[in-house]
Image (tube, helix red, strand yellow):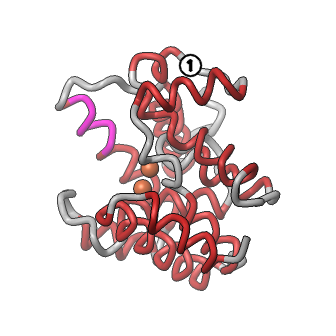
Amino acid sequence: MTLSEIEEKLQKILPARRFHHTQGVMYTSACLAMRWGEDMEKALYAGLLHDCAKYLKKKELYNECVRYGLPISKAEEADPSLLHGKVGAYYAEHIYGVTDPDILGAITYHTTGKPAMSLLEKIVFTADYIEPSRNQVQDLPQIRQLAFTDLDRAVLTILQQTLAYIRGNNQIIDDTTEITCQYYYDLLNGGDANGS
Ligand code: FE
Ligand code: FE
């Protein structure tokens, strides 16, 4: 499907606020693609589709994973809302016709990140956090600037803030988020990225 066909469809499915966020992530991903030399079209698709399964309730996300044989981790079992990336990537492929594995990866990992993300994955992960309609987060102006000057450091800062927020609210932490945070910490502090 074309971008505008997908946009039309998502506008009908997603609540207005979520759709607004989706557009913010799409255009912010495109801007970051311009800055860092990523394919802009890919960034637009990944940004547009990153939350395409976000309208589903926890139980529905869980059931979709069971139905399509998508693996569910312990943290995802405890908090199935974490599954919207994985289910979103499945929908992107099977409903919206996306075949590019990098776009599907960017959708899958936009919530937790993962070690050694591709450029596109880092772009969507970051855009999700800094898009213009976000306003709750601490130090957002600095992180927005960082995203255009040092993308890896922006990724690390977002992971650190996300973990602090989750811990502060006693929510369930996905191991992947912690592992990813350690990976980018080591990467930027000159340590061995493999954790020694
Ligand atoms: Fe999301
Ligand atoms: Fe999002």
Q: Amino acid at mark 1?
A: Ser
* Direction front: furthest residue: 12
Establish if 108 lies above or below 7.
above
Q: Where does residue 2 sit, x and y in percent of width and height?
A: 70, 76
Q: Residue 104 placed where, x, y %?
A: 70, 52
Residue 163 part of the magenta segment = yes
Residue 121, picture quadrant: bottom right
Closer-to-camera residue (98/134): 98
Q: Which residue is mark 1?
A: 73
Residue at 40 percent across and 17 percent down: it is 78
Number of marks present in the image shown:
1
Whole-percent x and y of residue 11?
A: 45, 68
Q: Residue at x 55, y 43 (%)?
A: 85
Q: Is residue 49 above or below residue 44?
A: above
Does 78 sit above or below residue 26? above
* Residue at 53% over, 38% down: 180
Say which element carries label 1.
loop
User: On the rendered structure, is 18 left or right of 156?
Assistant: left
The magenta stretch is: 162-167
Foreground pick, 173 / 97: 97
Q: Is residue 152 above or below residue 3?
A: above
Which secondary structure dominates the residues rendered in magenta?
Answer: helix
